[in-house]
Image (spheres, rainbow, N blue to C red):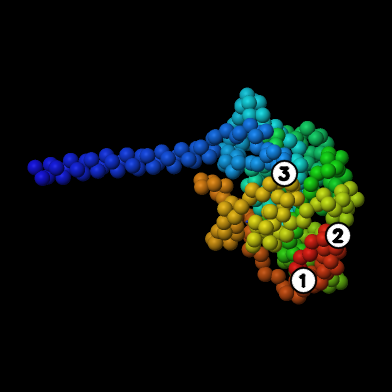
Amino acid sequence: MLFKQQALLRQKLLVLGSLAIGSLLYLVARVGSLDRLQPLCPIDSRFGPHGQEEIPLRALQFKRGLLHEFRKGNATKEQIRLHNLVQQLPKAIIIGVRKGGTRALLEMLNLHPAVVKASQEIHFFDNDENYAKGIEWYRKKMPFSYPHQITIEKSPAYFITEEVPERIYKMNSSIKLLIIVREPTTRAISDYTQVLEGKERKNKTYYKFEKLAIDPNTCEVNTKYKAVRTSIYTKHLERWLKYFPIEQFHIVDGDRLITEPLPELQLVEKFLNLPPRISQYNLYFNATRGFYCLRFNIVFNKCLAGSKGRIHPEVDTTVITKLRKFFHPFNQKFYQITGRTFNWP
Ligand code: A3P
């Protein structure tokens, strides 16, 4: 009798336990799917009485869901029409600098509900063949977005390519331009490291950084070496200033974006006239990666690919000193023009 009662009790407990677990799983799944699938409120209601944008946080999660599907090309024409989605030309472009942290900046800005990134580097303005395809080709490369959102693309080669400022100016003379810079010598070594890795992947040998950065005939800095030239930021910026006033540029501190991303992102939000939406919640430090990673919501988070944050080869300290001395006057000029001072040596 006692045994029978115990078995019955066990059975009841089992049923209750399964019910509780089932409900819990249902709730978790429901919260996740709600985040991703609940449609956005009508666009107008997102603007406050003073025309200030008030984007519900949920829009952020929604963006990860539906827009992601659209972006992957899984949307039908009917869905695109129904959701009023458009492919917009960028309102802001991250024009460089290569290895400054351009990918991190784009991905982090994409955390903002009003920002939609073009995932690939489009290379429209720096590549003659692409440019010849015309502006509609460029627009078609843009992701789908809601009309109130802004599209941002990044192609770091824009910063150093001669023809680009004029071409961008012809598209939109009031476009906002973002430049992310790092301490010039570190950036040059990072640039070298990327090329070196490419060579190693193809089982090729490559010169040491020291050999490329220093001219063996003069023992001076080799200004013909592209990684060095790219780090002379002021020279490139001066070309851009023939077309755009300095107010249209915002300089991002790439070194600070690594160690303390939020304040840098807040400055960008301000520059882009976006309401502050990116918060500390969206950024968490991943000790294994040694970098900040991105948190979209309780379900989605991601770190940048392993190709971002490579270990740099050790470089002879005399070469580093020489390079830093070389960059110094150019840096001073850059601070003067941009009004942003860095603690570069
Ligand atoms: P290193 O690989 O030299 O460390 P870009 O995207 O322009 O190619 O820049 C790459 C650089 O972005 C990396 O250079 C890395 O230091 C920097 N970076 C900044 N924030 C990062 C992040 N959260 N995760 C990974 N890399 C980041």
Task: Classify mark 1: residues with Cα within 10 Å, few (<14), some (14-19) or many (20+).
Answer: few
Name the front one of labels 1 and 2.
2
- Give the amino acid at mark 2: Ile
Q: Is residue 40 above or below residue 315?
A: above
Residue situated furthest front in the rendering: 49
Side of 221 relative to 303 (left or right): right
Task: Classify mark 3: residues with Cα within 10 Å, few (<14), some (14-19) or many (20+).
Answer: many
Give the label on residue 175, or none: none
Residue that mark 2 sits on: 337
Residue that mark 1 sits on: 345
Are discs 2 and 3 less than 8 Å apart at CB?
no
Label 3 CB-ligand 1 distance < 8 A:
no
Among the two numbered marks 1 and 2 on one chain, the one whose residue lies closer to the N terminus:
2
Q: Position of residue 178 (x, y in %)?
A: 76, 51
- Give the amino acid at mark 1: Pro
Residue that mark 3 sits on: 152
Label 2 CB-ligand 1 distance < 8 A:
no
Q: Quadrant of the N terminus?
A: top left
Q: Tally the marks.
A: 3
Side of 292 relative to 132 (left or right): left
Q: Position of residue 274 (x, y in %)?
A: 71, 46
Side of 254 relative to 159 (left or right): left
Which residue is painted at 69% across and 38% down in the image?
49
Q: Is residue 53 above or below residue 191?
A: above
- Give the amino acid at mark 3: Ile
Q: CA distance from mark 1 to mark 2?
A: 18 Å
Among the two numbered marks 3 and 1 on one chain, the one whose residue lies closer to the N terminus:
3
Which residue is painted at 45% across and 39% down in the image?
29
Let me know if residue 11 appears in the view. yes
